[in-house]
Amino acid sequence: MEALRNIEGLLNLLDPTVNVLYRRTAAKALAAIAPATAVPEMASRLAAEPDRGVRQSMVRGLGRLGDDQALPVLIRALQDRDLQVCQEAALALSRFNSPAAFEALLAALTRKENREDWQIRRFAAHALGKLGDRRAVPALIASLRDGNDLVPPAAAEALGELGDQQAVTALKTVRHTMPHRRGAECATCQAIDAALKRLT
Ligand SMILES: [Zn+2]
């Protein structure tokens, strides 16, 4: 397709009147090329885009570009109705060295508005580990006691990744005092052990 050869052509294909399959292809190509000039257009189209695959690619592209112009829409994408888009948004934000990205992920780490929000908390823990700002350590320590089984392993992994010694005691305490699943398949204990290995 001729349009695939230039950025402007790709951006034109993002128009909502274009067939969704073309929109997806264009968004994927833009995410892969990540042209800096595409930021304003992708950022302005993201919220209104009805297809989740297109939104996901847009978020990925904007994350790769790391342009601060995209921050507000990426932060809003953390509230996307589709969980995969939220996951992509958390990952995208982890690439930004910006207080706004950090604060947004920190807020997502404790979000409890909907029943599915544990997944957002898990994505946020993962992203905070990648982002690498050690000020997230106290909040991640608190998440070791998250009510959903799948959040503590992500928090433990992030703590291991951040490499801050102040997490060691907390990790050990949770390892020995929390009521975990029995046997070797306790994901929390496995993640804690792996984190302690990195930290000590
Ligand atoms: Zn356990």
Image (spheres, grey):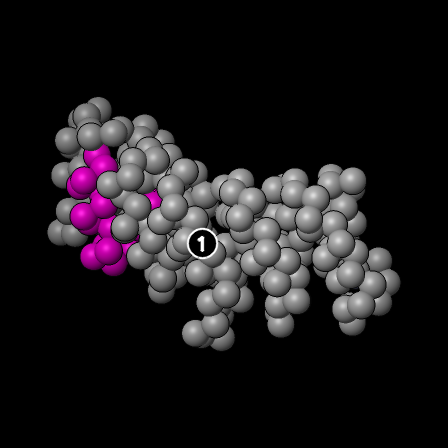
- Name the quadrant of the N terminus: top left
Q: In this view, does 146 lie above or below 71?
A: below
Answer whether residue 52 is visible to the viewer in this image. Answer: no
| Frontmost residue, 9 versus 40 | 40
The residues colored magenta run 38-61
Q: Quadrant of residue 154?
A: bottom right
The image quarter in which residue 52 lies: bottom left
**Most distant residue in the right direction:** 183
Mark 1 within 8 Å of ligand 1, using the beta carbon: no
Residue at 76% of width from left, 54% of height from top? 169
Which residue bears the numbered disc 1?
Answer: 105
Type of amino acid under label 1: Leu
Specify the farthest residue to the top: 5
The stretch drawn in magenta includes residue 114: no
Give the quarter of the figure containing the C terminus.
top right
Q: Which of 144 and 11 is in front in this view?
A: 144
Where 113 sits versus 97, above or below? Answer: below
Judged left or right of residue 29, residue 192 is right
Pick the residue in front: 65 or 129.
Answer: 129
Q: Is residue 199 visible?
A: yes
Q: Which residue is rendered at x = 45% and y = 43% of the image?
A: 94
Task: Determine if the magenta segment contains residue 42.
Answer: yes
| Residue 74 position within the rendered picture, expressed as x and y whole percent measured from the top left | 32, 49
Taking the image as shown, residue 165 lies to the left or right of residue 151, namely right
Residue in the picture at 30% in, 46% down: 71
Measured from the top left, where is residue 187 in percent x and y?
73, 58
Label 1 CA crowd tier, 10 Å (few <14, some 14–19, many 20+): many
Please tell me whether mark 1 sits on a helix, a strand or a loop.
Answer: helix
How many numbered discs, if any? 1
